[in-house]
Image (spheres, rainbow, N blue to C red):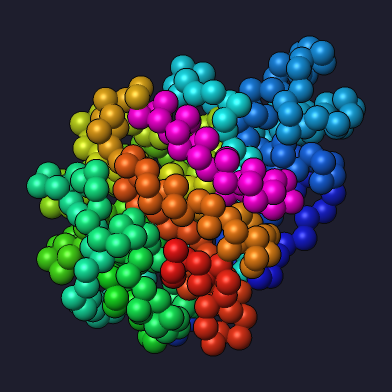
């Protein structure tokens, strides 16, 4: 996997570069941004960190403020500099609308490295039409109740596991063709095949709403009806609207998109709320809080959350603990606070330990997948290893990597 190299000071870069693939224009997001630190010891103190959002204002006012364990050993001068940077760059959060969750369980958020094989298309470009493929008959299908709500027990081997892929995934799904663990696939769009030669036909396909600058997607309704008719069990709303490199919507815009394109399918499939990052402040659950305020009459079967940490910040065991803590504390507290989500299941729509070696990625999955499979509050999950070379596919493109093999088998 090609990784970004970070300088030792503040990074605030977000560049959108168009890349032509056939007739489609896909946007590559090069995000080496949103972090305030002076060296690797401060990498944990980053713009979207709930720890920083809570700690920095207090520390700048009172330098004797107790220091979080993830910043232990960092000098006072470095903390002051990083916090001052954080305060300048962090989006202001509305205290009245921030969910009452414990910052101690909030994960460290690491930016997603940009590679040609791990980039999601921008919400501002809509992929051209391509022929939807009806999936072959399979025992791996999500069990959906009569109102669209996922049942507590998913009735097939594996039960919850999805595969992410995109226009660069070629025919790599063939390496998972014989896996009974794969329940569904998704690619941040509404077309099963996002580009010529990209295939995924071994399980239901879950569409994700993407809109143009006018908050429109004219091909969405007809395609989703066809997908539901062919077995799609759920619908994903906007992908990371709290991230400027992804859907990049305000809570009000995200609510408009949801009402126009997702809510109409209530009762026909499980409806997932917009997928949020594991950020703090006005992002992550803070964004979802504001979104719910704009979508009071909306129905949700699933709360869709993403979780990323970086191997340079945490070891494998800590990364696994961070996921568990985030779901059982932060997300659970948010659900308990909002009646609209109290009966909703959780989808861990994306998760990964960035910059882990293949062996470490495999160990991360070995520790986490059984827990996710056995947790009745979790309806679905998708590791961001994905169908790309250097991720779940080996670098040569000839088979599965070690982490891919675990995702295939375990």
Quadrant where the C terminus lies? bottom left
Relative depth, front residue between 159 and 203: 159
Which quarter of the image is occupied by the N terminus? Answer: bottom right
Q: Position of residue 240 (x, y in %)?
A: 45, 48
| Rendered position, 309 above or below 70 | below
Whether residue 212 can be seen here: no
Question: Which residue sits at x=72%, y=46%?
Answer: 313
Q: Is residue 36 left or right of residue 147?
A: right
Work out whether residue 36 can be spotted: yes
Q: Quadrant of residue 187?
A: bottom left
Q: Quadrant of residue 195?
A: bottom left
Residue 230: give x, y in percent of width and height: 15, 69
Q: In terms of depth relative to the viewer, which is nearer, 168 or 388?
A: 388
Q: Which residues are magenta?
A: 308-335
Does 108 sit above or below residue 367? above
Q: Residue sitting at 45 percent across and 37 percent down?
A: 327
Q: Viewed as shown, does residue 146 lie left or right of 112?
A: left
Can you tell which quarter of the image residue 87 is in?
top right
| Residue under the image location 46 percent in, 54 percent down | 369
Q: Is residue 325 magenta?
A: yes
| 337 relative to 139, above or below | above
56 left or right of 267 in image? right
The x, y position of residue 197, in whole percent, is 39, 87
Left or right: where does residue 88 sit relative to residue 21? right
Q: How many marks?
A: 0
Residue occupying image coordinates x 32% and y 53%:
236
Which secondary structure is most common in the magenta stretch? helix
Vertical comparison of 197 with 153: above or below: below
Determine if the magenta segment contains residue 184.
no
């Amino acid at each position: 996997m090609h990784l970004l190299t970070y300088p030792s000071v503040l990074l605030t870069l977000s560049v959108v570069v168009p890349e032509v693939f056939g007739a489609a224009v896909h946007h590559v997001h090069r995000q080496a941004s949103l972090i305030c630190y002076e060296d690797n010891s401060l990498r944990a103190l980053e713009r979207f960190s709930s720890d920083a959002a809570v700690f920095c204002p207090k520390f700048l006012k009172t330098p004797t403020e107790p220091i979080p364990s993830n910043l232990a050993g960092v000098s006072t001068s470095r903390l002051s500099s990083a916090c001052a940077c954080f305060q300048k760059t962090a989006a202001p959060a509305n205290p009245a609308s921030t969910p009452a969750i414990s910052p101690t369980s909030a994960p460290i958020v690491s930016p997603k490295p940009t590679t040609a094989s791990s980039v999601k298309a921008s919400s501002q470009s809509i992929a051209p039409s391509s022929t939807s493929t009806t999936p072959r008959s399979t025992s791996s299908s999500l069990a959906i109740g009569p109102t669209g709500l996922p049942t507590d027990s998913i009735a097939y081997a594996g039960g919850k596991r999805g595969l992410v892929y995109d226009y660069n995934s070629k025919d790599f799904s063939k390496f998972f063709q014989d896996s009974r663990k794969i329940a569904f696939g998704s690619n941040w769009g509404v077309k099963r095949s996002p580009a010529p030669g990209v295939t995924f036909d071994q399980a239901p396909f879950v569409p994700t709403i993407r809109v143009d600058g006018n908050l429109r997607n004219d091909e969405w309704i007809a395609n989703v009806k066809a997908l539901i008719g062919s077995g799609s069990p759920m619908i994903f709303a906007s992908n990371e609207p709290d991230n400027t490199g992804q859907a990049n919507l305000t809570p009000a815009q995200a609510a408009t998109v949801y009402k126009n394109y997702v809510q109409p399918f209530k009762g026909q499939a499980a409806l997932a709320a917009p997928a949020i990052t594991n950020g703090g402040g006005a992002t992550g659950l803070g964004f979802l809080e504001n979104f719910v305020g704009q979508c009071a009459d909306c129905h949700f079967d699933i709360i869709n959350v993403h979780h990323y940490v970086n191997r340079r910040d945490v070891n494998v065991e800590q990364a696994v603990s961070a996921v568990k803590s985030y779901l059982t504390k932060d997300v659970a507290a948010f659900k308990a606070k909002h009646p609209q989500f109290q009966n909703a299941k959780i989808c861990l729509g994306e998760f990964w330990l960035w910059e882990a070696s293949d062996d470490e990625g495999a160990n991360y999955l070995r520790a986490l997948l059984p827990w996710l499979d056995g947790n009745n509050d979790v309806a679905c999950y998708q590791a961001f290893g994905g169908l790309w070379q250097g991720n779940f596919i080996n670098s040569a493109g000839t088979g599965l990597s070690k982490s891919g093999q675990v995702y295939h088998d375990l």
